Amino acid sequence: MKTVVLFESYFGNTRQIAGAIGNSLTQNNEVRVLNVTEVSWNEISDAEILIVGSATRAFRPCEATKQFLKIVK
């Protein structure tokens, strides 16, 4: 199963969590862990599972994550 884990991280904590999620899914799966600010549509278009995580600012996802989610909606 093709899985993409996207993250946006300011201090590295969300990146670590995204990496841990990706590592836990690698058995029998193709997993890519990518930064939401650097991802292209071609990298995620064939994903069967898409997991998106973000650091928060004022209890909301960061701006790049919000913009990404508007595009894939």
Image (cartoon, helix red, strand yellow):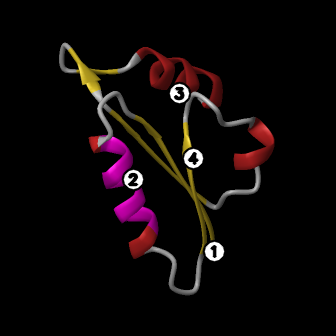
How far apart marks 3 and 4 lie (CA) works out to: 15 Å
Give coordinates of residue 11: x percent, y percent: 29, 32
Please tell me whether residue 63 is drawn above or below residue 47 in the rendered image: above
Q: Which mark is residue 43?
A: none
Q: Which residues, given as a range, are shown in magenta? A: 14-22
How far apart marks 1 and 2 lie (CA) works out to: 17 Å
Dividing the picture into quadrants, the one containing residue 61 is top left
Disc 4 target residue: 34
Q: Secondary structure at mark 4?
A: strand
Which of the two discs, 4 and 1, labels the residue nearer the N terminus? 1
Which residue sits furthest left? 59
Q: Is residue 48 left or right of residue 63?
A: right
Give coordinates of residue 53: x percent, y percent: 38, 41
How far apart marks 2 and 4 lie (CA) works out to: 9 Å
Q: Which mark is residue 18?
A: 2
Q: Residue at x 32, y 42 (%)?
A: 14
Q: Which of the two discs, 2 and 3, sits closer to the camera?
A: 2
Dividing the picture into quadrants, the one containing residue 46 is bottom right
